Image (cartoon, rainbow, N blue to C red):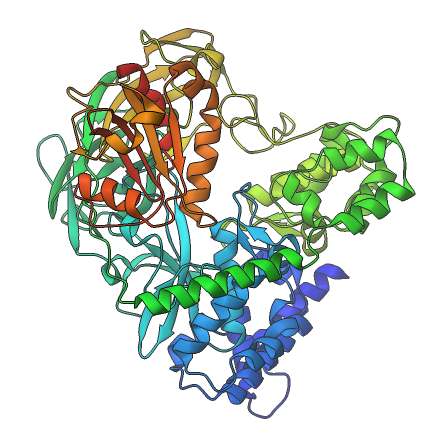
Amino acid sequence: MRKLFFLLAALAALVSCGSGPKTESEKYVDFLYANMPWPDLAAQPMTYWQANVDKTLEVRERMGWDIPEREFRHFVLPLRVNNEPLDDFRTLYADTLCARVEGMSIGEAALEINHWCHEMATYQPSDGRTSSPLQTIQRGVGRCGEESVLAVAALRAVGIPARQVYTPRWAHTDDNHAWVEVYVDGKWQFMGACEPEPRLNMAWFTGPVSRALILHTKAFGDYQGDEDVIQRTPCYTEINVIRGYVPARRSVVTVLDKVGKPVKDARVEFKIYNYGEYYTVAAYQTDRQGRAALDMGCGDMVAWAAKDGRFGLAVIDSEAVTVTLDHAVGEGFSLDLDIVPPAEDPLPSGATPEEVARNAGRLKAEDALREARPKGNAAVLDAFLAAHDDANARALVASLSAKDRGDVTLDVLEDAYAHIDGVFDPLRDCPRVDIEPLKPYFAELSALGLQSRSEIVKWMAANIRLDNKHNPQGLRMAPIDVLHSGKADRKNRDIFYVALCRASGLEEQLDPLTGYASMDPEERPAVAKGMLEVSYDGQDAPEYYYQFTLTKIFPATGETRLCTVGEDSDHNPWNSIFPLELEEGYYMLTSGTRLADGSVLSHNEFFTVTAGETTQVPLVMRKAENQLSVLGTMDADRFLPQTGRGYYMLAVLGERDEPSVHARRQLETLQPVLAQWGRPVLIEADADGSILEMLCSGVKSESRQKPVVTICDSFGRIVYFSQGYNTSLAEDIKRILPQL
C-alpha cells in the first residue's frame, strides 16, 4: 500500500485533480514534484509540500516585495538548500521571522534575519552529516554548511531569494567553505551565514574568496540564467558564480590524441589540489573540436582528460591549455606539477567604524541570548537512560556520534534497544549506517523474517528497484523510506542492505575502502587484491589525506575515485597504513608540499596493483629551495623580555569568528610539537590593534583581519605569516619548525 501511495502522490502532482484550471498553489506544487529528487518524494507526503507552498504564497502576499518570478521559483519556493534532511522549519518559523522584519527593505531584512540566525547558532566544526535547520537550532551550533542551510531557510521563509554558495575547495589552503547570497535590488549579494555584518558584501572570508578558483551554487530545477553552468541534472542546475566575486578567465582545454588530432567526447575533469588530492570541481565531455571550458579564478587548476583507456593531465594556467592523451592506463610513470593559487585581493567592506562598533555590540548581546537558550538533546538521552539503566543502553548511546547524540529521537533509540539480543554489538545493533536520516527501522525490517545474506539479496532484487537517475545529488535516504518506496540509488540501496542485515541479526557495515556494501557473491563477485608497499626516506611522517592520497583510475571511463584508507581517525601517518591491501587495478599516488604563499609542489606516481602480488612505490615529498625567506620585519624589542633571543611564535586571535576558532584548534593540536620546539609562544589579545597593525604592515598585507599567526625572531624578522582562514596552519608549522 505504501508503494501505491508514492505512485499516486507523484501522479497527482503531474495531472490536474479536477476539470477546471489549476490554482497558483497547485502549479507550484507541480513544479516541486517535477524537479524533486526521489529521497524527498519518498520522505514526505503531498500534504507536506502543499502546506509549505501555501505558507510561501501567504508570505509573498504579506511582505509585498517585488521578486521576479525566476528568482521566486528557484530560490524562494524550494525547501531544499543542499543535502540536509527536510523539516518543518518554514511552516513553524515563517510568521515569527516575518514579524521581525515587517516594514524593512529587502536588504535591511536580509541583514536582520542573519542576526536572528546568529541568535540561534554559532560556528562549530563537526562531521559530514548536514543537520536540518531545526536540528541546528536545537544544538545551537553548526559547521559552515549547516549555518548556511539555516540562513537560507530563514531568508526564504520570509520570501527573500537566497542560495548557499560554496567553494568546493580552496586553492591556497585545504578545506572548503559555504556562505549565503541574497537577491537584493536586482543583484546577488553575499554575507557570512550566522555571522552578521553591518552591510551586505562584508565577511571575514573576502580575502580567501579573492583567491578562489570556482564558486558553486545549486538552483532547484532547470534554471536558465547568465551564469556558467557546471551541470544540469533532472533535479537541479549547478552554476558557477565566480565572476560575481573576482576577476576571472574562461579557460579552454583542448584534448588531442597522440598524433595531435582533437578528441571528441573525451572526459575532462577540472581539479583543484586540496587535502593531498586533485579534487574534481567540474567535469565535461569535449565537443567536436576536442574542447571543454570553465570560468575560473586567475590561478592554477589541473585538467585531467581521458578516453578509451588513454589519459593525460596538465596545469591550467591560462585561457588556452592543451592536454594530450599520451599515457595508457597501466603505464607506470612519475610526474611533477607546480600549482600556484590566485593572488589575494580582498574586497573592500565600505562599512563605517560606527557601524562596525554597533554591530559588535549586537553580536555580544546575541551571544548571550544564544547561550542562555536551552539547547541540546539531554532530555531525550536522560529519558532513555532512565528507562533503561544498563550497559546495553549506555553502549547504544555511545555508539552514536556527538552530532547524533545531539539530535537523535527517542523512538530511534527505543527501536534499536529493543533489537539488542544479548550484548550490544555496534555492527548489528547501531542504527547509524552512513550519514542517512535516523528513523526507526529495526522492528519493521526484522518483521520481514529474512535470516541470511543470500535471502536478503534475493528479497532486495525482487522488491527494491535500482534508480541512479533521480537522486543526482546523492541524498541519503532513511532505510525505512527505501522499504516503503521500493526504490533507491546504489548508495541508498547499500545502506538499506546494511540496515536489513542488522535488523536480521547479522553484523554488517559499508566497506571502509569503497564506501559500498559487500553483498553476496551472487550479487557482487569477490574482487582480486594485491599488496601495496610504500617507501619514504624523510624524517617526518606525512599523513594520509593531508599530504598524500591514493586515487583509483577506471580504464573504461577515465574517471577517478579517491581511496579511503587508514584507521577511523583524523590523522594517519604513512607508516601506519602500508603495506596496504588494495583491489587490483590502476592507481595514482599523489603528494603535495604546500608552501607559505599557498603554492603546491606536487608529485604523482602512476602504478598497477596486480592480484596476488606486491607493488612497491616511493612516496615523494618535494622540497622548496629557500622556502623560509624573510617575509617582512616588525618591532621585536617590545617582546624581548618575554622571548629572549631567538625564534618565537606570535599570534593575534579573534574570539568567536570561524577563522580564529580554526586557528585555536590547530594550535591546540600542536602543543606537543611546540613543547618539543621549546621556544616561547605568545597569544596576544591585542585590545588596541597595535600588534595586528605592526605585523600586517611588516609583511605589507593590506588586510587587518584576525587571526594572524607568525614566527619571528628577536631581530624583528618574520619568517612565517598566516592570516585569516588557513586549515593548513598546523601542517605549515610542523614543516617549518625543524628548519629553524
- Which image quarter: residue 545? top left
Question: 611 or 568, which lies in front?
Answer: 568
Residue 371 screen position, x and y as percent: 62, 55
Residue 580 screen position, x and y as percent: 47, 13
Q: Quadrant of the N terminus?
A: bottom right
Residue 441 screen position, x and y as percent: 77, 46
Q: Is residue 163 above or below residue 596?
A: below
User: Which residue of the protein is positioned furthest toward the front in this rendering?
Assistant: 641
User: Which residue of the protein is positioned furthest toward the left in this rendering?
Assistant: 260
Residue 229 at least partly seen: yes
Residue drawn at (46%, 61%), measured in percent from left and top? 235
User: Which residue of the protein is positioned furthest toward the bottom in this rendering?
Assistant: 20
- Which image quarter: residue 337? top left
Residue 392 screen position, x and y as percent: 84, 31
Question: 97 or 236, which lies in front?
Answer: 97
Q: Is residue 389 above or below residue 77?
A: above
In the rendered structure, the answer to whether residue 233 lies left or right of residue 371 reads left
Residue drawn at (56%, 42%), measured in percent from left and top? 491
Question: 39 or 274, which lies in front?
Answer: 274
Residue drawn at (82%, 45%), measured in percent from left and top? 382
Residue 620 at least partly seen: no
Q: Is residue 488 above or below residue 243?
A: above
Question: 76 or 506, which lies in front?
Answer: 76
Residue drawn at (21%, 40%), measured in percent from left and top? 341
- Which image quarter: residue 120? bottom right
